[in-house]
Image (cartoon, rainbow, N blue to C red):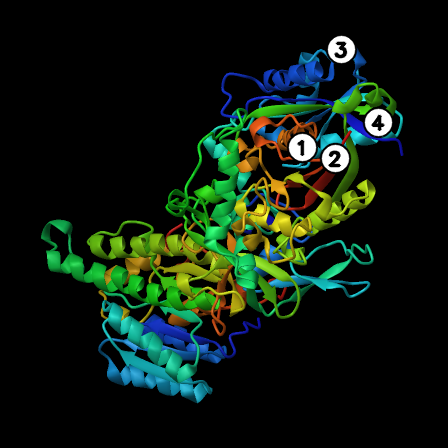
């Protein structure tokens, strides 16, 4: 299931595979160590502070600001149809950092270091397979969340 | 710890070497190095190969290279830390000698970058960052340094022109280096017209892939001392790592691993930044050289752009940087680069760099970065 | 079975009479607000709304020819305005206009295909747009066993009903990742007012096809549809369920 994440995936499995399942349902999840409370984004199964392997997912609001960015004109294999695209590093309000694509609500010439943004979970909609990602949009952008998948 | 010295150095021609295999390239540099050292192959106790395996069709390159060089049955192994593999090989040889396990060790940095097809190479380019959270968005090697540049320009006002000044300097010196891939100077006009790669970096900000090899022979103090004043001492050996992922780097306007490695190397060699007369730094992208000036303490943080603009890194300036052309003009055979840097510093400290000689060079430095800054090796050399 | 439709909002096309009416009322009984689209029978449509309100839910009727996409878009807007949400679509509006092919006019063919198949496209499209954004939706397209087999003198009707099944399956594939279920229900003969006018020998022939010896009531169909509109059937999608008393096995 982690293999759902990204335009091209290099990681089919991970101890945090459910990150991709949550993302499909519209939820951006970081992790919290069950033993010492260390919280981070992106999520990780093994606590760097206390070495515990027990963790829970913790939802991030996705609100943050741009730390840096670059518009990529020369694409690696698998991204040829996406080029040019802008990648940005976002400092998240509720902790951690994220790298993602600038989305359609932010015109390319308006991207600025320090601007407030909203990270939005996305599905690649027009392909048959399930692929999930997130984009970096204007604050206030809304999106749908499916009922949590483990509810009856 | 006993001193370790460089007793021989050799450098092959970097370029699109479709005329040779990786072991044949290694032999070119090795032959020159042992002739330079005036030793026989039997004098070599072990070899360390710096090469990055995933670009080669041949699996386990170390064994093939060492056999071709005629060094079997002596021990050999590969060191790999991306673009710093050559320096890792030097560090490993240093460790082997200063531990007393070996007396004379050959270090061969060798790399073919052109054996794979273009799509295979482009696919590898996309996996240079953390594949789990970053490569899925199509980040590329230039893309990362471009993000560092965007931030550096924002925080310090570094300009587009200042970045190109690095390329202009390195091509200026590369034109005088018979082993370099690119032998022509470039102009600011030419650079400004080049195609974008990842904003703000353009083609002229980026080093090119190349095939090539370089070789160093290192020896324990008592063996090195027998060879008179052409020995160059490896007195400072620094290495540090930093977060692989940009998501956990404390700052993106410099390389924390470079600063830490330099601190260690300076302290070990008993020098400070101001003592360094000649340096080869890792200019995979123009911004990388500007950040290197700052990380190595040649100028304060944020002033790297002005440093190059004022020509303080040219011969005759505060410290001559990349006067062999750097990665920019030489090309970047990633496993070989670290050893190529050391070759240049050794040559300079011996006074044998001819038209590119830095006058009075007595302390030199190499700064070799792996990947997007997760590993940096800084070596300080001293004239014998 | 607790279907959990409480608070949901549904659109039923062709909801003023027969099967459509029964579905509308059943969904209201299960707790949903219901809007019915209808073409001609104003009084009947108003009566359905009254019944929905008597049950205690919100009701709405909208007059429109299902072959207009613009009207379909407008109906969704009206439902969002009136109920504040939209979660369920049941496409039921359909017509017949029988004839053997060598006597069937272009108009006979076009009209049946347009109302039946294009009409389902229109409402499935407007629903899909809304459901995929909210990552929730249930679509039930009422087809017919005569879309799964051929029927004499109904090439136009059968083609449209068969087309609705293929449409349903394609949309199930497109919308699955958005948590939207798309299924088809294929009744055999159902006893509605429309069926009263049908000649006895026709009805007897159909009765003889069944294994249970009776016809479906509109409520029989409505029970199945309600199940497919609920989260109880969340793992069923792209499916065609016959409800024909064994008429076509």
Q: What's the chain of the residue with tag 4?
A: B
Query: Which is closer to the viewer, label 4 or label 1?
Result: 1
Q: What's the chain of the residue with tag 2?
A: B
Whether residue B357 is visible, yes or no, is yes
Disc 4 + disc 2, Cβ < 8 Å: no
Whether residue B208 is visible, yes or no, is no
Residue at x 62%, y 32% (from the top left corner):
B337
Q: What's the chain of the residue with tag 1?
A: B
Can marks 1 and 2 be said to lie on one chain? yes
Of A48 and C210, the residue lying toward us: A48
Query: Which is closer to the viewer, label 4 or label 2?
Result: 2
Q: Which mark is residue B97?
A: 4
Query: Which is closer to the viewer, label 3 or label 1?
Result: 1
Q: Say which quadrant the N terminus of chain C sits in.
A: bottom right
Of A147 and C52, the residue lying toward us: A147
Q: Which residue is mark 2?
A: B381
Q: Position of residue B339 (x, y in %)?
A: 67, 29
Q: Is residue C78 above or below residue C160?
A: below
Residue at x 34%, y 63% (from the top left corner):
C125
Q: Which residue is mark 1?
A: B345
């Amino acid at each position: 299931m982690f293999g759902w994440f990204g335009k091209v995936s290099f990681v089919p499995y991970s101890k945090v595979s459910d990150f991709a399942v949550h993302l499909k349902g519209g939820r951006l999840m970081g992790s919290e160590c069950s033993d010492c409370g260390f919280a981070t984004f992106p999520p990780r199964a093994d606590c760097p502070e206390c070495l515990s392997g027990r963790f829970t997912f913790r939802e991030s609001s996705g609100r943050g600001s741009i730390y840096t960015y670059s518009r990529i004109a020369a694409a690696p294999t698998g991204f040829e149809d996406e080029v040019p695209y802008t990648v940005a590093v976002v400092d998240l309000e509720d902790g951690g950092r994220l790298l993602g694509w600038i989305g359609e609500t932010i015109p390319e010439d308006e991207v600025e270091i320090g601007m407030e943004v909203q990270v939005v979970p996305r599905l690649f909609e027009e392909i048959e397979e399930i692929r999930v990602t997130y984009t970096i949009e204007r604050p206030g952008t809304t999106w749908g969340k499916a009922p949590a998948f483990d509810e009856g | 710890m006993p001193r370790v010295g460089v007793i021989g150095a050799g450098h092959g021609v970097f370029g699109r070497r479709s005329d040779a295999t990786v072991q044949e390239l290694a032999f070119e540099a090795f032959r020159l190095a042992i002739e330079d050292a005036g030793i026989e192959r039997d004098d070599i106790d072990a070899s360390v190969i710096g090469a990055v395996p995933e670009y080669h069709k041949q699996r386990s390159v170390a064994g093939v290279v060492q056999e071709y060089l005629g060094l079997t049955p002596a021990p050999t192994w590969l060191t790999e830390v991306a673009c710093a593999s050559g320096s890792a090989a030097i560090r490993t040889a240093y460790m082997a000698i200063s531990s007393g396990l070996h007396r004379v060790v050959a270090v061969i940095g060798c790399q073919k970058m052109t054996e794979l097809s273009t799509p295979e190479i482009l696919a590898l380019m996309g996996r240079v960052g953390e594949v789990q959270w970053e490569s899925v968005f199509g980040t590329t090697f230039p893309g990362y340094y471009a993000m560092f540049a965007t931030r550096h320009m924002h925080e310090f006002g570094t300009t587009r022109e200042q970045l190109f000044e690095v390329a202009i300097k390195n091509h200026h010196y590369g034109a005088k280096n018979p082993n370099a891939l690119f032998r022509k100077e470039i102009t600011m006009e030419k650079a400004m017209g080049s195609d974008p790669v990842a904003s703000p970096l353009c083609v002229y900000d980026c080093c090119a892939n190349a095939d090539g090899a370089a070789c160093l022979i290192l020896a324990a103090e008592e063996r090195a001392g027998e060879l008179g004043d052409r020995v160059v001492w490896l007195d400072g050996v620094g290495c540090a790592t930093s977060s692989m992922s940009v998501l956990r780097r404390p700052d993106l306007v410099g390389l924390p691993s470079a600063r830490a490695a330099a601190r260690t190397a300076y302290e070990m060699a008993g020098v400070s930044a101001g003592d360094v007369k000649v340096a080869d730094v890792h200019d995979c992208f123009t911004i990388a050289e500007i950040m290197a000036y700052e990380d190595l303490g040649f100028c304060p943080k944020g002033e790297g752009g002005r440093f190059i603009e004022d020509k303080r890194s040219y011969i005759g300036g505060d410290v001559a940087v990349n006067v062999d052309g750097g990665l920019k003009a030489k090309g970047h055979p990633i496993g070989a680069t670290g050893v190529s840097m050391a070759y240049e510093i050794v040559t300079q400290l011996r006074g044998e760099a001819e038209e590119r000689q830095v006058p009075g060079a007595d302390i030199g430095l190499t700064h070799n970065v792996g990947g997007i800054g997760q590993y940096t090796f800084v070596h300080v050399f001293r004239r014998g | 079975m607790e279907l959990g439709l409480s608070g949901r909002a549904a659109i039923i096309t062709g909801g003023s009479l027969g099967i459509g009416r029964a579905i509308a009322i059943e969904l209201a009984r299960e707790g949903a607000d219901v809007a019915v689209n209808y073409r001609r029978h104003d009084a009947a449509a108003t009566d359905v709304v009254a019944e929905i309100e008597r049950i205690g839910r919100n009701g709405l009727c909208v007059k429109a020819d299902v072959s207009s996409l613009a009207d379909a878009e407008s109906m969704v807007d009206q439902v969002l305005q009136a109920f504040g949400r939209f979660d369920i679509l049941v496409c039921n509006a359909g017509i017949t206009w029988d004839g053997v092919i060598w006597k069937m006019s272009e108009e006979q063919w076009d009209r049946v295909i347009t109302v039946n198949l294009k009409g389902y496209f229109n409402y499935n499209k407007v629903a899909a747009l809304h459901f995929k954004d909210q990552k929730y939706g249930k679509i039930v397209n009422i087809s017919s066993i005569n879309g799964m087999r051929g029927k004499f003198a109904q090439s136009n009707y059968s083609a449209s009903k068969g087309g609705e099944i293929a449409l349903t399956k394609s949309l199930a594939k497109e919308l699955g990742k958005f948590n939207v279920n798309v299924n088809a229900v294929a009744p055999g003969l159902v006893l509605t007012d429309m069926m009263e006018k049908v000649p006895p020998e026709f009805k007897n022939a159909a009765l003889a096809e069944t294994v249970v010896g009776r016809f479906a009531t509109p409520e029989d169909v409505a029970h199945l549809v309600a199940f497919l509109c609920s989260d109880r059937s969340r793992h069923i999608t792209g499916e065609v369920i016959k409800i024909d008393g064994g008429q076509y096995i």
